[in-house]
Amino acid sequence: MYIIIVGGGRVGYYLARALLEEGHEVLIIEKNASFCDIINEEMGSVCIRGDGCEAATLADVGAGRADMLVAVTGDDEDNLVACQVAKYKFNVPRTIARIRNPQNEAIFKKLGVDVPVSATNIILEAIEKEVPTHPLTHLLTLTERGLELVEVRIPPTSSSIGKPLKEIPLPAGSRLALIIPKNRRPRIPTPSSILREGDQVIALTTPEAEESLRTALTGT
């Protein structure tokens, strides 16, 4: 794959090294001449000095044939613009943007960024997996379809315990995909499946229905 990285700071540097080791064709666009010199000395001629937000710069590096553009500068606005120019000017199939402010994630998605990556949210989700009191964890976001794959743990206080699924009012657009009981084999949910304390429920839902799904399953 031909992958363009906008931003040659620490994130861009280590990302480029990893991608090169995997055999990808990589080019970094970096405004700082010193950063470019360091990268080129260590990795070969893989960095050019320029502004990845500008169409002329992206044209010069062959963005029209790129498989992916990853914007990892320290500025959310620059990352957004670089991804938009790549997608709508050069039809780059996949764009990924680093987000420093997690509140920007929703707007990035609405404006066409395929994968907004918030380090803050990644850390929070890692914490959530270790905190048994937190009932819902994001597993995967299907941006193109407007869906999310989530895991909901059934707490001991849940009003859904002991009820068959057909009696639990799930929000529209939500589907349960798998129930993983404690110390038992996973099972595919049916209308007569009974939820028990400690069950892990894997579900497909929309961002808008996520809170309603959590409430329906946990009773909180």
Image (cartoon, helix red, strand yellow):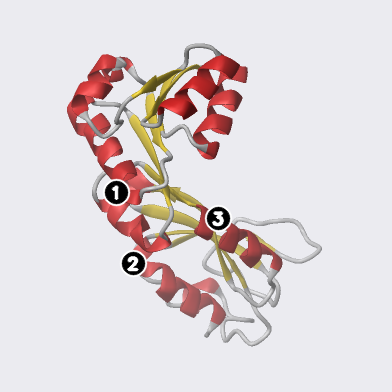
What residue is shown with label 3? Answer: 122
What residue is shown with label 1? Answer: 77
Tag 1, which secondary structure?
A: helix
Residue 157 appears left or right of 19? right
Q: Position of residue 20 (x, y in %)?
A: 57, 19
Residues at marks 3 and 2, CA–CA distance in whole angstroms: 20 Å
Residues at marks 2 and 1, CA–CA distance in whole angstroms: 25 Å
> As displayed, is residue 172 above or below residue 94?
below
210 or 76: nearer the eye?
76
36 or 183: nearer the eye?
36
Tag 2, which secondary structure?
A: helix
Q: Residues within 10 Å of mark 1 (few under 14, many from 20)?
A: some
Tag 3, which secondary structure?
A: helix
Which residue sits furthest top?
A: 45
106 or 167: nearer the eye?
106
Quarter of the rendering containing residue 131: bottom right
Q: Is label 3 or label 1 in front?
A: 1
Q: Residue at x 34, y 42 (%)?
A: 79
Q: Earlier in the sequence, mark 3 or mark 2?
A: 3
Q: Residue at x 26, y 30 (%)?
A: 86
Q: Residue at x 30, y 31 (%)?
A: 52
Q: Earlier in the sequence, mark 2 or mark 1?
A: 1
Residue 191 appears left or right of 95? right
Quarter of the rendering containing residue 169: bottom left
